[in-house]
Image (spheres, rainbow, N blue to C red):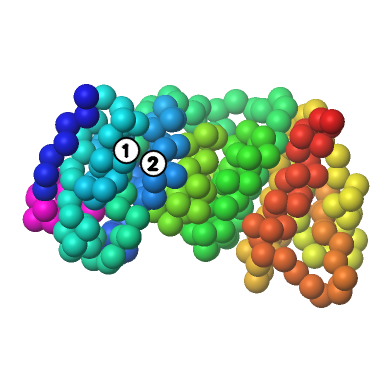
Amino acid sequence: MPTFIQSTADDPRLEPYHDLRSNRRWASPDGFIIETELVLGRLIDSDFQITELVLSPTKAQRLKDTIPPDTTVYVLERTEIERLIGFDLHRGVLARGSRPKGLFPAPLRETPTRGNWLFGENITDPGNVGTLIRIAATLGFCGAYFDPSSSNPYSRRAIRASAGHIFRIPVDTVPTSELLEYFHNGTIYAAALRDDAQTSFHLEPDDGPTLLAVGNEGFGLSHEVLTASKIHVRIPMVQADDSLNVATAAAILCHQLSHLRAQP
């Protein structure tokens, strides 16, 4: 049975949750903080480890039968949670977790032989980072990579935007040059607003390893990625100078490459 502990914002054991908006220490596979009941449910259903939960009394009562045994649950009144984290968390659900060593193989360990991967370069909005992870997971991609200039995929906001799908597929931060070398025997598609780019209508699932690269909405992909890519691809739009949010564009392109298209 889970252990339920009545607590307050002054509990020293809850120090990781202090001033949550500016707290950047807990944002890596080795230790991250999540919020919302939906994300917690997917964390519970995954092979990730749960360090502890922080719940309001209402949420503790609601979720008590779904919490894994041997989990420590700190129960705080809503006002105490607000005092602890520094803002009103009306959802009443927080948790800290980590990714066990070896759960997902380290990136770049072996050259891939098949499957699709998504790469976000200089994606600075954590909401977009999380949504890209969600798109990759729901459309059957093998994993999602981000370069170091992108927002941290294990930040609280990115995990929330991923709707917990970050717990389903490998997600890592990898330098661009290393990732391109990793896929040098595969097919690299670069999303680019270029006149000579192939339209997305012609994208077809590939049996070999495929990397789809999407870039910053203001600057696009780097010269390094554009040079290394086999195919530049664009989404046809009514006006030539129109553009889409990076996550929206990625959803369209990922679906085009997804093997789900082959299903009836």
Graded by Cα atoms within 10 Å as few (under 14), some (14 to 19) or many (20 or more), the crowding at tag 1 reads: few
**Residue 112 picture location, percent across and down:** 67, 28
Q: How far across and how far down the image is residue 165, in percent?
A: 52, 41
Of the 4 image quadrants, the one containing the C terminus is top right
Is residue 209 left or right of 79 when viewed as pictured?
A: right
Write the residue at 39% across / 41% down. Answer: 40
Tag 2's secondary structure?
helix
- Residue 111 visible in the snapshot: yes
Q: Quadrant of residue 115?
A: top right
* In this view, 142 is above or below 6: above
Which comes before the other along the chain, label 2 or label 1? 2
Q: Residue at x 77, y 33 (%)?
A: 259
- Prevailing secondary structure class for the magenta stretch in the rendered image: helix
Residue 63 appears left or right of 221: left
Tell me the magenta residue range. 8-17
The answer to which of 2 and 103 lies nearer the viewer is: 2
Residue pointed to by mark 2? 40
Residue 123, placed above or below residue 61: below
Q: Position of residue 170 (x, y in %)?
A: 53, 35
